[in-house]
Amino acid sequence: MDTLTRVPTQQQAAREPRHVALSGWGRTAPSVSEVDPVTTDARIAERVRDAGPRGVLARGLGRSYGDAAQNGGGVVLDMTRRRAVLSVDPTTGVVEAEAGVSIDQLIRELLPHGWFVPVTPGTRQVTVGGAIASDVHGKNHHTHGSFGHHVEALTLLTADGSVRRLGPDDPLFWATVGGMGLTGVILRAAIKMTRVETSTVLVDTWRCPDLDSVLAEMADDDRYDYSVAWIDSLARGASLGRSVLTRGRFATVDELPAGRRDQPLAFSSRTLVTAPPIVPGGLLNRWSVAAFNEVWYRKAPKRRQGEPQSVGTFFHPLDGVAEWNRIYGPRGLLQYQVLVPLDASDIIREVAETFSSNGLSSFLSVLKKMGPGNPGHLSFPRPGWTLALDVPAGDPAVGRLLDRLDESVIAAGGRSYFAKDARMRPETAHAMYPRLAEWNGVRGDVDPDGVFMSDLARRLQL
Amino acid sequence: MKDANNLPQRVVLVGGTSAIALATVHRWLDRRADLEVVLAARPSPARAAAADALRHAGARVTEADLDLAGADTAREQLGAVFAGGDDIDVVLVAAGVLGDQEAAWQDVDVALLLGQVNYTGAVLAGVLAAQRLRGQGHGALVLLSSVAGERVRRSNFAYGASKAGADAFYLGLAEAVRDYGVQVMVVRPGFVRTPMTHGLSEAPLAQDPSQVAAAIIDGLAAHQRIVWSPAAMRWVMSALRHVPYPVFRRLPI
Ligand SMILES: Cc1cc2nc3c(=O)[nH]c(=O)nc-3n(C[C@H](O)[C@H](O)[C@H](O)COP(=O)(O)OP(=O)(O)OC[C@H]3O[C@@H](n4cnc5c(N)ncnc54)[C@H](O)[C@@H]3O)c2cc1C
């Protein structure tokens, strides 16, 4: 399905709008829309003003897992051609970047000057626009909050085609941070970068034999800027939730191994391999994944301190394999990411138990302790535990299990992440995001006719 | 919008009392008791009963009047079914009449009715549904065809011919709309034990509607063009297609 259609020539294809089947990173439930590789503000305003009955939506690098960046039958503005870093303030580290600039590009251009992105998700291949619209979080959420905390201002093009500059004192700013592209098109943003002396992270690794021990270890997360645990979702019984906890902070120049001191800020962003384009389904099964998880757990050191790791190795290990989502075969994958309050870790156990006892083969699942949230109406992060697991899509039995888990999550006051979701029910989403009505009020003021629309919004009745 | 596990949110049944179509919807409801169903059919106690059963299983049901016997009325009624409302994920075109096969080649009215409902009705629904789904950029259109159209035979050629026409139209339609995100699938069941076939003697490989329903749902997930139910029917029909006519004529089918 994800083939391009009606492509006259390579060159034209790059510049002209065309009908394309789009899906998210999970490669499930595609829809066809008119994709316009917009370049100028004027063109974007025109497309928004002339939006047809199916509306319009901005899309970044399509790294959300589900249907957040799709708008079937409507217009999708491909923002990735707008990738200029417009200005950098060398004293404050505030960068004005176009929405199509990727986290990868920001790191490549600015890390050599001693500035690192304030927040990075598990992949560098996301745009600034996508990072704001999903209000993404990284391994430093407990200390530095989500991406929206570091946006000093953003420029938004709204439904009437007008352009406004918004700061954190404006409700529309917080409706847009985490607003999944449904308040308008983010054109540019001012982001405050983080000062670093080196591009090396000093990492402490703890191997934790079960869930209780990893939860307990994370009690002193605040000693580290960055922290995340990789969970073996297939481990059962006494080993349920066994994990490898990795935590770290950027090294100072003095702390670098001697060989690296003359180039302390070196950074390389290569991918090592690309997954083959066509993979039969079923390659990933509980046995292959169990074997993988076993090896990976065993090879981790019981305890290791101060290991120097590169930015790529520490933050984006999956970026080493381009298009790894294809190994899930034609039916695609889905990611189940939930967050529950700190006192509801029993729900994390319930999720882990459900996955392991049903043999749901999630490669490397991620557990993280989150810090305070922000005023974003739909922003996902809150203080609590978040657990993210990948599973093959298309299995109705899995669907039923996840529906049941959703109920436990809701009962505990928790939620799922829109940027990952491809399967929630509308009622579930509404229960998880109690500020949805308030957000819709702000959205309705600037977009009374619902010009901005996505498949996610249709599916979940946002 | 369907979800990552291929669960639809809103489906339209053209021929809303079809046992196979209803079995398909119940199967979806078993997976998640959350579905909006539009039952387009002639008003009847059977439609009301089907609606009740679906509601009982957790669906939100709308009943819409549809009589495919008259093209003008049907066109208007189908237009209303496909206008507005939330996105439609699946349209199941399941309306069909079997009729008295001996009357169907001797009585003009009976013959025309078969063509009207099974062929013209299916074409009408196909064109209007495809238009709607194309506008959405996603959705599936499923025709309940029949193995009877694969090679017509003496005992039910009037029915078979009308199904063959619709089957061919949908296969072509599938190609026409595939670039617009619309999936068209033709289902060719063998003998199914339904009210429509009640009283007929069972053919080999006879099955229940729930078996066809399972094949439909699997076929949609696997993006198939043609679904045979049971799967072995494909090979049976492929053999039958090539049997010399003098032999075919004498087969007890
Ligand atoms: C391997 C992997 C690891 C990940 N790890 C994490 C993680 O650790 N933490 C985390 O928070 N997320 C994570 N994600 C999710 C990802 O960060 C988010 O989905 C992010 O939004 C993707 O950015 P994108 O540019 O690809 O946006 P898209 O997926 O293209 O779009 C996402 C949303 O942003 C909107 N949008 C995009 N650009 C604009 C714009 N210019 N104006 C307005 N709206 C816009 C879209 O409409 C859509 O609603 C991960 C994803 C992958 C594939």
Image (cartoon, coloured by chain):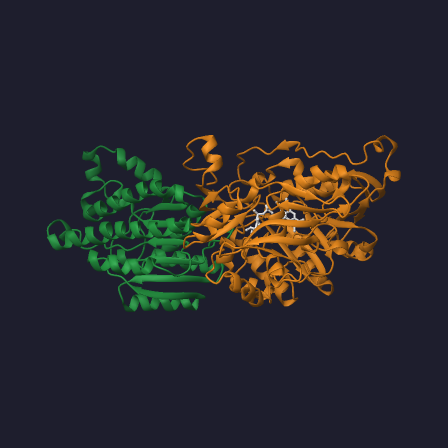
Residue in view at x 55 percent, y 50 percent: A66
Figure colour of chain B: green
Front in this rendered view, residue A166 or A109:
A166
User: Is residue A39 in view from this perspective?
Assistant: yes
Q: Compared with residue A382, is residue A241 higher up or lower down, i.e. above or below?
A: above
Front in this rendered view, residue A283 or B157:
A283
Q: Residue B11 at what x, y percent from top left? A: 39, 57
Question: Residue A429 vs residue A113: left or right?
Answer: left
Q: Residue B211 at what x, y percent from top left? A: 39, 52
Front in this rendered view, residue A178 or A174:
A174
Figure colour of chain A: orange
Q: Residue A342 at what x, y percent from top left? A: 73, 63
Question: Residue B91 vs residue A277: left or right?
Answer: left
Residue in view at x 64 percent, y 31 percent: A273
User: Is residue A292 in view from this perspective?
Assistant: no
Question: Residue B240 vs residue A443: left or right?
Answer: left
Q: Residue A323 at what x, y percent from top left? A: 59, 37
Quarter location, residue A339? bottom right
Q: Compared with residue B96, is residue A324 higher up or lower down, i.e. above or below?
A: above
